[in-house]
C-alpha cells in the first residue's frame, strides 16, 4: 500500500463496514461478511484499490441453506457452502496476507481518529449493523445493533448532535425523534445499503409534523456556534427555514449570548464568549497595510485599488470593531486587540 494514499470518504465507509462486520481478531486475513452483495462488492473493490500492488488473491465464500450456486459477477475464486441457519444467502470476502492486514489496521487507526471521517464511518457502520423500525402508532426508530455500549460509536453520535439511548434488552442503540431523523437524513446515514436506503427515506418522508423537545433547536444551535455559521448553513444543517433560524438567533443576540458579523453581504454568527471577531479578506488587506505604518484613506484606497468612499466605509466598519482608529491628523492607525480575528 502506498503510504501516501489519499483516504477518501469511500475508504472511510469501508472502515465503518469492517468495524461493523469484519473480523478484527485475525492477524492473517481481511474478511467482510454480509448478505447484501452490493456491499460486499463495494468493500472488495476498495480493498483491491488500496492494496493494488500487493498481489492479492481475493476469494468469495457463498453460504446458503441449500448450498445454492449463486452467480457472482466478479473474477474471484468462488466457494459455495451450506449453512442451515442461513435464512438468506450471505457472502464472505477474504484476502490473506499478514503484511496487508497490518497495513489495513494501521489505516483504520488513522481514519478512526480523524473527525472529518466520522460521517463516512457512521454510514458504513450503519450499513453493516443498522436497521430501521417503523411500527404501529407512527413509531419510527433507527437502531444500531451492539452487544454492549460502544464508546467509539457514542463519540460519533455525539459529534453529530444525535441523542440516543442504549437498550440492553434490544442490544442496540435506539434513536428516535424527528430532529434526529433530520440529522441522519442530512448525512445520508442509510444510503450505502439499497434496502435500508429505501426504507429510511420512505419512513422519513412519511413524517407529518415535527415535534422537537423544548429548546432543542436553540441548544443545538448554541453547541455549533463555537465556530462561525451563517443562518443559511444552519438552516441546511437542521433542515429548518432561515426565518426559523433567525427566530432563534435574534433573541440570543439581544441577550448578548451570540454576535453577528457581516462578511460579503452575509451575516455570520458566533457565541459571544468565544472572544472572536469575523472579517472578510478585503478588510484583512487594510489591517495588513496599517500594520506596516499609519496611512490616510486616500493612500489605502490607492493601494487596495478601490475608490475613496469604498475604502472609508471599510475603515469605519473596522473602527466599529475596535481594530483601527482615525487620528486627529486624518490617518488611520491599527489597534491591538485581545480578540482573535477570523478571516472568511
Image (spheres, rainbow, N blue to C red):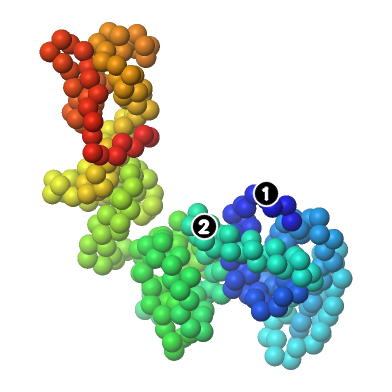
Query: At which x and y percent is residue 33?
Result: 69, 75
Measured as percent of width and height from the top left, residue 249 is found at: 22, 48
Please report the residue visible at 66 percent of the width from the left and 79 percent of the height from the top: 25
Q: Position of residue 123 (x, y in %)?
A: 54, 63
Please name the residue shown 54% across and 63% down the image.
112
Q: Is mark 2 on a helix, strand or loop?
A: loop
Which residue occupies the extreme front position in the image? 292
**Above or below, comparing residue 94 to residue 282 in the picture:** below
Which residue shows up at 86% across the image and 63% down it?
A: 75
Who comes first in sequence, dot 1 or dot 2?
1
Q: Can residue 130 be seen in this view?
A: yes
Q: What is the CA distance from the residue labelled 1 to the residue labelled 2?
A: 16 Å
Relative to 20, 341 lies left or right: left
Toward which corner of the image does residue 45 lie, by quadrant? bottom right
- When asked about the image quadrant of residue 22, the answer is bottom right
The label shown at residue 114 is 2
What element does badge 1 sit on?
loop
Q: Assign the N terminus to one quadrant of the image.
A: bottom right
Q: Which of the numbered marks, if any, corresponds to residue 55? A: none
Q: Mark 1 points at which residue?
A: 4
Q: Which residue is depicted at the point 34% across and 44% down?
A: 229
Residue 257 higher or lower than 148, as above or below: above
Q: In which quarter of the image is the C terminus?
A: top left
Viewer-closest of 279 and 134: 279
- Residue in front for this viewpoint, 206 or 121: 121
Q: Can residue 243 be seen in this view?
A: no
Q: How crowded is mark 2: few (under 14 residues within 10 Å), some or many (20 or more)?
A: few
Task: Indicate the position of residue 262 as horizontal and vertical percent values.
Answer: 27, 33
**90 versus 194 height, above or below:** below
Amino acid at each position: 500500500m502506498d503510504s501516501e494514499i489519499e483516504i477518501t470518504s469511500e475508504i472511510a465507509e469501508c472502515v465503518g463496514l469492517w468495524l461493523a462486520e469484519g473480523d478484527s481478531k485475525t492477524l492473517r486475513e481481511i474478511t467482510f461478511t454480509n448478505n447484501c452483495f452490493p456491499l460486499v462488492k463495494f468493500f472488495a473493490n476498495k480493498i483491491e484499490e488500496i492494496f493494488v500492488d500487493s498481489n492479492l488473491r481475493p476469494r468469495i465464500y457463498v453460504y446458503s441453506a441449500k448450498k445454492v450456486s449463486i452467480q457472482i459477477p466478479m473474477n474471484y475464486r468462488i466457494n459455495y457452502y451450506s449453512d442451515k441457519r442461513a435464512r438468506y444467502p450471505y457472502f464472505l470476502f477474504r484476502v490473506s496476507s499478514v503484511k496487508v492486514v497490518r497495513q489495513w489496521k494501521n489505516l483504520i487507526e488513522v481514519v478512526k481518529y480523524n473527525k472529518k471521517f466520522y460521517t463516512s464511518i457512521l454510514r458504513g457502520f450503519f450499513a453493516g449493523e443498522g436497521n430501521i423500525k417503523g411500527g404501529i402508532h407512527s413509531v419510527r426508530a433507527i437502531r444500531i445493533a451492539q452487544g454492549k455500549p460502544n464508546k467509539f460509536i457514542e463519540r460519533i453520535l455525539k459529534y453529530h448532535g444525535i441523542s440516543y439511548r442504549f437498550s440492553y434488552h434490544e442490544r442496540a442503540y435506539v434513536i428516535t425523534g424527528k430532529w434526529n431523523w433530520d440529522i441522519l437524513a442530512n448525512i445520508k446515514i442509510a444510503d450505502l445499503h439499497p434496502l435500508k436506503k429505501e426504507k429510511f427515506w420512505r419512513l422519513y418522508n412519511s413524517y407529518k409534523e415535527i415535534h422537537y423537545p423544548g429548546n432543542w433547536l436553540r441548544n443545538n444551535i448554541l453547541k455549533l456556534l463555537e465556530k462561525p455559521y451563517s443562518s443559511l448553513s444552519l438552516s441546511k444543517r437542521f433542515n429548518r427555514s432561515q426565518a426559523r433560524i433567525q427566530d432563534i438567533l435574534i433573541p440570543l443576540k439581544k441577550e448578548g449570548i451570540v454576535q453577528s458579523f457581516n462578511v460579503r453581504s452575509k451575516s455570520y454568527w458566533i457565541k459571544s464568549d468565544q472572544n472572536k471577531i469575523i472579517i472578510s479578506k478585503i478588510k484583512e488587506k487594510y489591517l495588513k497595510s496599517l500594520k506596516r505604518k499609519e496611512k490616510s484613506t486616500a493612500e489605502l484606497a490607492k493601494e487596495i485599488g478601490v475608490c475613496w468612499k469604498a475604502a472609508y466605509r471599510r475603515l469605519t466598519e473596522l473602527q466599529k470593531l475596535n481594530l483601527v482608529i482615525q487620528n486627529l491628523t486624518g490617518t488611520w492607525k491599527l489597534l491591538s486587540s485581545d480578540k482573535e480575528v477570523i478571516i472568511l
